Amino acid sequence: MKIIEIENNKKEYLPLLLIGDEQEDMIDKYINHGRMFVLCDNEPKAVCVITDEGNSILEIKNIAVAQNAQRQGYGKKIIEFISEKFKDKYSLLQAGTGDSPLTVPFYENCGFKRAFKIKNFFINNYDHPIIENGIQLVDMIYFQKKI
């Protein structure tokens, strides 16, 4: 297993990125200025795009694990890698997600705590309802952890 930084042809990983953010024009807003990492275990298993948000905050804009590799620890591994790699430059790692029983426990299990929310984020920024596990996502819930 190895984690590599992707600097060129980031859209080559679009099918994986769309698992974490299902609208391509939203991905386009951060993919070029974000740093992208891919975890490979014979093949790409997980992807993570991060951005510098200023004030010593590093934000996960997209994290996704291939369907056939979910619940095997790959998402947690890539977060541990990001935390370790950037701990000397940033003090906080944050991630925004929907209030879903699929994603909230993942972030909590990775050591994140609820920090704040942006009301109506998914309604105001996506061109269709975002449904996760039968629940329409409305607010963006932000999680943070010290690194």
Image: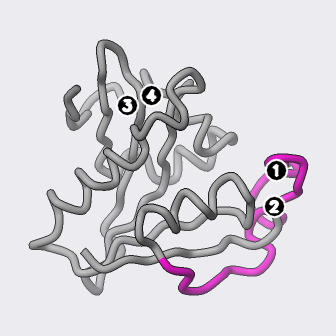
Q: Residue at x 80, y 67 (%)?
A: 124
| Quadrant (top left, top right, bottom left, bottom right) of the N terminus | top left
Q: Which residue is mark 2?
A: 137
Q: Residue at x 17, y 60 (%)?
A: 84
Mark 3 secondary-structure assignment: helix
Q: Is residue 78 left or right of residue 4?
A: right
Q: Is residue 86 left or right of residue 143?
A: left
The image shows a total of numbered marks equal to 4
Measured in 3D between alpha carbons, the distance from the residue under mark 2 to the one under mark 4, in whole angstroms, is 25 Å
Residue 108, compared with residue 39, is above or below; it is below
Q: Is residue 115 magenta?
A: yes
Q: Earlier in the sequence, mark 2 or mark 4?
A: 4
Q: Earlier in the sequence, mark 3 or mark 1?
A: 3
Looking at the image, do the residues carrying marks 4 and 3 touch, with CB atoms under 8 Å apart? yes
Looking at the image, do the residues carrying marks 3 and 1 touch, with CB atoms under 8 Å apart? no
Measured in 3D between alpha carbons, the distance from the residue under mark 4 to the one under mark 3, in whole angstroms, is 4 Å
Q: Which residue is mark 1?
A: 130
For the residue marked with disc 2, what is the amino acid?
Answer: Leu
Q: Is residue 49 magenta?
A: no
Residue range corresponding to the magenta coloring: 113-136
Q: Residue at x 61, y 49 (%)?
A: 26
